[in-house]
Image: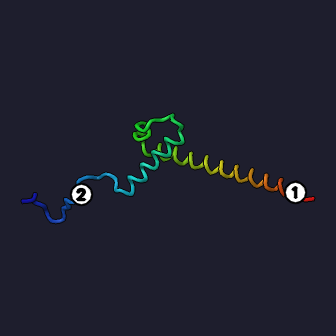
Amino acid sequence: MGAPSKPGFNLESTFFGFEPKHQVELHNQLFELIWAGDGRWSWDEIYHLPLHVRKLWIAKINKMRAEENERMETLKQKQQAKQRRSKTP
């Protein structure tokens, strides 16, 4: 015999935790921060960071990576242009 329920009262979900797709996102963020931190932070420290602080660090790391990629691409283009000029008789 189940617990009595009132009309309009939903007893299906009693836990308000993450859905599986959000769990994957959380663990990807944890991994990114630990990896980018080069061992400066432990998993426990990152896991217990307030969400807004964790998102701030993720955004900062993404920005730094994008800037580094742009720098590398610019350097690569300069080197290719230099090689073309040196090959021209």
Which residue is labeled 2 in the image?
13
- Quadrant holding the C terminus: bottom right
The structure residue drawn at horizontal position 54% and vertical position 42%, both measured from the top left corner, is 36
Amino acid carrying label 2: it is Ser
Tell me which residue sits at (49%, 41%) in the image: 34
x and y, in percent, of residue 20 in the image: 35, 56
Residue at 62% across / 51% down in the picture?
66
Nearest the eye: 63 or 24: 24
> In screen coordinates, is 9 left or right of 32?
left
Toward the bottom, the furthest residue is: 7
Left or right relative to 24: residue 8: left
Residue 52 is situated, as x and y percent measured from the top left of the image, at: 46, 45
The percent coordinates of residue 57 (x first, y second) are 52, 44
Q: Which x, y percent locates residue 61?
A: 56, 46
Tag in front: 1 or 2: 1
Residue 87: give its label: 1
Residue occupying image coordinates x 43% and y 45%: 51
For label 1, the crowd category at 10 Å Cα-Cα, with few meaning under 14, some 14 to 19 and many 20 or more, is: few
Q: Is residue 51 above or below residue 89?
A: above
Element at label 1: helix
